[in-house]
Image (cartoon, coloured by chain):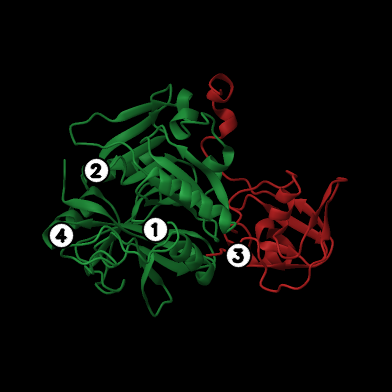
Amino acid sequence: MKKGVMRPGHIQLRVLDMEEALGHYRDLLGLIEVDRDDQGRVYLKGWTEVDKFSVVLREADQPGMDFVGYKVLNSEVLAQLEQALKDYGQDVEQIPAGELKGCGRRVRFDSPTGHMFEIYAEKEQTGKWGVEQVNPEAWPRDLTGMRATRFDHCLLYGPNIEGTAKLFQDVLGFDIAEQVIDDEGKRPALFLTVSQKAHDVAFIECPEPGKLHHASFLLETWEDVLRAADLISMTDTSLDIGPTRHGLTHGKTIYFFDPSGNRSEVFCGGDYHYPDHEPVTWTTDQLGKAIFYHDRALNDRFLTVLT
Amino acid sequence: MDNHNNRHPQPGMQTPHQVALADSDTCFKAEPEISVLVAMERAGQQLIPVGCRGGGCGKCRIRILQGDYFSKRMSRAWVSPEQEAGGTVLACRVYARGDLLIKPDPPEIAVSCHAADQPDQQNNKR
């Protein structure tokens, strides 16, 4: 049941070298650099996103994800969900307004998979980048690189994904849109949505806590995914796999790495979900096809390379 | 629009160096401006496991037993400052400055499923 969480709002990623990282997220993915802060963090967004930023890069000596945040309807909902998280038994931390520039107060909480999540109600709305709010043109003409439209979701690896999924379902109102089930009935992969998207966050079971598999950005068309592949080659960027299609979610996709080893995805298309839909199920004996619909074979790098 | 994956900040030196594996008679050439890992891939060899190629995932960890090299920042999750001082590095973040003698040192990475464990690797591949 919906609890007032709207969408993924931001992800903070750790990178080894900020200038190299900007070559990836700004120049190659085509995100818009919108701000920097006195900690040296750089704020970016996809051009269609109305809020001020969705990606925050922080230079550190270990790549990976600091946290991912979800925007809720309003401050009343934020207060309700904060209490619900405490009642559920999560460790909850208050992050004051302005700690991220332009973002209101955030409620940060831990999870069984070892990831840190946040909810917040307010963020400065600067509007879609490069188009007017009234009578908007189709797209801005001065985009670069892959012209990624928005931060879409992330896939996280950790132990006890059932625990984190239950937290997201019971407290935050997410639904299971897609799942992988093994022959003992265990679920090694869960795709959750809080919208009509096939996933707003996804989890894969792994003994190592708090790991990032990828951060994903939306493109409009398959042609855009192929063009992204061209740009990956033109820039000698580290390719993981693709262009291809997933069985899970049926999205069309390509995976590659940022210069610190964090995996990026750009994708288009895919399934939709309504709250009355049963989860789409894939079985582990078809996992190759579930993940790479064309190859129908898994590769170790895709399953085991994490930050 | 260049993530510097194959570039080195000090261009000019162009002599390829030899990278040899300890306890083995295999070796490959490494241009000084491309990482040891990418040099191995370009030589068509599979001597070191390839992961992210960005210093993040730890797959390509090696020990450099002998020779000069330049290295860029790499994840502390896989290489501590003490290990780095002793020649343990990620091959994707090091550039040969002379002939190298190396030994793969991939870390144990705990994961729940490997491709090889999947039944459809035999049954379902086209």
Q: Which residue is mark 2?
A: A174
Q: Nearer the viewer, residue B7 or A264?
A: B7
Q: Are marks 3 and 4 in contact (CB under 8 Å)?
A: no
Badge 1 and badge 2 in a common chain: yes
- In this view, the residue farthest toward the top is B123
Q: Is residue A278 left or right of residue A37?
A: left
The mark found on residue B4 in the picture is 3
Q: Colour of chain B?
A: red
Evaluate whether residue A170 shows in this view.
Answer: yes
Chain ID of residue with mark 1? A
Distance from label 3 to label 4 (Cα)?
45 Å
Question: Is disc 4 placed on a helix, strand or loop?
Answer: helix
Q: Amino acid at mark 4?
A: Ala
Residue A77 location, x and y as percent? 14, 56
Distance from label 2 to label 3 (Cα)?
39 Å
The mark found on residue A147 in the picture is 1
Q: Nearer the viewer, residue B117 or B85?
A: B117
